[in-house]
Amino acid sequence: MGNKQEWKADRTRIQSWIEHLSQFNATPGTGNTRQLFTQEDIGGRRYIIDEMKALGLDVSCDDIGNIYGVCKGSGEGLAPVWSGSHIDTVYQGGAFDGISGVVCAMEAVRMIREKGIPHKRDLVVTVFSGEEPARFGMGCIGSRVLSGHLTTDQAKKLMDPDGISLYEAAKQAGYTPDCLERSIKKPGDVYASVELHIEQNALLEREGLPLGVVTSICAPSNFVVEVTGRSAHAGGMSMEDRRDAFTAACEMALAVEECGRNESQSEYSTATVGSVKVEPNQSNIIPGKVEFTIDIRDAGKESKDHIGKMILERMEAIAKKRGVQVSWRQQNNDAPMPCDLHIMEKIERYSEEMGIPYKKMVSGAFHDSMFLGEFCPVGMIFVPSRDGLSHCPEEWTDYQYLETGSQVLAAVLAELANEE
Ligand code: HGY
Ligand code: MN
Ligand code: MN
């Protein structure tokens, strides 16, 4: 787009959308909990759909509940430009993770519409179902369906802690998961997708930068590990005779941390033990069984596989030394997604034009854009997280950053929507 536009996002509107959405919350007072297809999620969906309609968008949902708010373009038969994120949260998470991307996309499209900026391609505000693995143990559910990585049969096998399948939960929420395959997008169906998201790390804040241009999105490999020792009397059994599953698991968890730190072969890697279950979990019984999760992230697939291999070798050696058994199952091994250079160039160019300092950076967190990138070019705009905190009640992003991020997003979307 040749002419320089003056973009003026409405910070109070962005704040009002975020604050209103955070009322749909299962844990008020201790962070935000809005898990996929729960009453809170359904309430939040209804609110966002009403707000999209109030902006004049045509709203529809697909079989797994992804929401599309369409601002019609002037052209015919052109693939649309998407922008959005997710509104579901982790347990007792924050008010900005995902939500920022949805409301800033709404604000960007509002500015384009109200300024009467012509655009050939439809502009679509998107809300993807279940980006967080919180309820079903698998993240990016809506964007996995779109990229052909989640079928109806798999949805019937994916269970929440209460034994409700994703398939059942989707039907109870009023969606139609009987043939998820028909939602699969092929290259060319979507022209481009740009997602604004909070950084969830402290790099931007540390350098005093209001905006990040994401170069690639790290992908997770997730494992569930089972350590089997021998339950016994905490006082009766001598120290040298025990086969303590918990202390073995602790040594394994330290090995996970060490490998995440020292075995990386790329610019960004992490390895985390996030969930631990101890059996029988009694103060006077030596733990006989422990189940824990491993979450490995990496900007490079080879590096991630290498870290995983090192961790598994270390766990086997620890098990042998301590006389316990260890087994594991890998839940997913997703591929890191590079962002599209042309979209990155637009984000950089408009940031410079608007006098917004920025840096290029990797995303350690995964996002729906990781799967969208399998059928369309993707770009991501980061805005700072205070103290780098996210996935916790303290998660915060100053509204001024959402305002400037929306303005860059609007300019990028307007240009993309006029490309032939
Ligand atoms: O875990 C992640 O990276 C994302 O926030 N769900
Ligand atoms: Mn998250
Ligand atoms: Mn997110």
Image (spheres, rainbow, N blue to C red):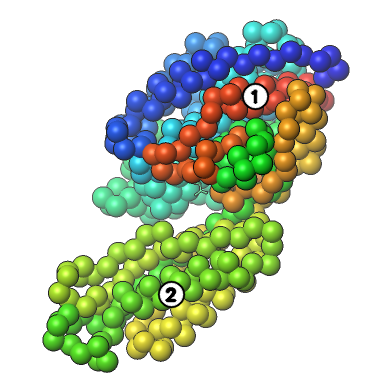
Residue identifier under label 2 = 252
Can residue 234 be spotted in the picture?
Answer: yes
Q: Is residue 338 left or right of residue 255?
A: right
In the image shown, does 36 or 311 lie closer to the viewer? 311
User: Quick one: quadrant of the C terminus?
Assistant: top right
User: Quick one: quadrant of the N terminus?
Assistant: top right
Q: Amino acid at mark 2?
A: Met
The extreme right residue here reads 2
- Between marks 1 and 2, how big is the CA–CA gap? 44 Å
**Vertical position of residue 266 compared to residue 37: above or below:** below
- Residue 110, quarter of the rendered image: top right
Q: Residue sitting at 18 percent across and 87 percent down? A: 237
Q: Residues within 10 Å of mark 1 (few under 14, many from 20)?
A: many
Of mark 1 and mark 2, the one earlier in the sequence is 2
Q: Is mark 1 within 8 Å of ligand 3?
A: no
Q: Residue sitting at 68 percent across and 67 percent down? A: 265
